[in-house]
Amino acid sequence: MDIVFINDLRIDTIIGIYDWEREVRQTVSLDLEMSSDIRQAAATDDIQYALNYKSVAKRLIEFIEGSEFLLVETMAEQVCDIVRSEFGVAWVKLCLRKPGALRHSRDVGLIIERGERF
């Protein structure tokens, strides 16, 4: 299995359960690993056969900037659903970070994998 990745995609959004979090935009950071068979893209040198990471990033930025989730868990599930359903990705691993959410810690977050690894 080949993996296309995006690291530290930073997006401002409304996220959190506390009243003050509902009033300010906070930055979330995403690391994504997405399964993709790159052989046809490599053989043809044609973007139509590649998983276009720019298109994935643009879609996720649009989605997350417009969202107002309470929990990072909900955001993570929906991000993985978008990547898998809209971009034909069989397997995705997402690390979603919320910088500054916990005092004395650089960031907090979660890591999830969805789909089948081949």
Image (cartoon, rainbow, N blue to C red):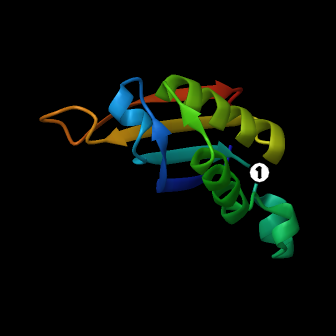
- Given residues 23 and 70, the one toward you in this image is 23
Residue at (81% x, 76% y) in the render: 45
Residue 20 appearing in the image: yes
Instruction: Tell me the kind of residue under disc 1.
Output: Asp
Q: Position of residue 86 (x, y in %)?
A: 82, 44
Residue at (70% x, 54% y) in the render: 59
Q: Is residue 93 above or below residue 112?
A: below
Q: Is residue 81 left or right of residue 4?
A: right
Q: Is residue 72 left or right of residue 45?
A: left
Crowding at dot 1, Cα within 10 Å, few <14 / some 14-19 / many 20+, comes out as some
- Given residues 7 and 105, the one toward you in this image is 105
Q: Is residue 116 above or below residue 60?
A: above
Q: Position of residue 71 (x, y in %)?
A: 48, 24
Q: Is residue 90 left or right of residue 62?
A: right
- Given residues 80 and 17, the one toward you in this image is 17
- Residue that numbered label 1 is attached to: 37
- Given residues 100 and 53, the one toward you in this image is 100
Q: Position of residue 118 (x, y in %)?
A: 72, 33
Tag 1 secondary structure = loop
Q: Is residue 82 left or right of residue 24?
A: right
The residue lying furthest to the left in this view is 104
Toward which corner of the image does residue 82 lie, by quadrant?
top right
Q: Is residue 65 above or below residue 91?
A: below
How many numbered discs sit on the rendered protein? Answer: 1
Q: Position of residue 9 (x, y in %)?
A: 49, 55
Residue 3 appearing in the image: no
Residue at (63% x, 47% y) in the render: 66
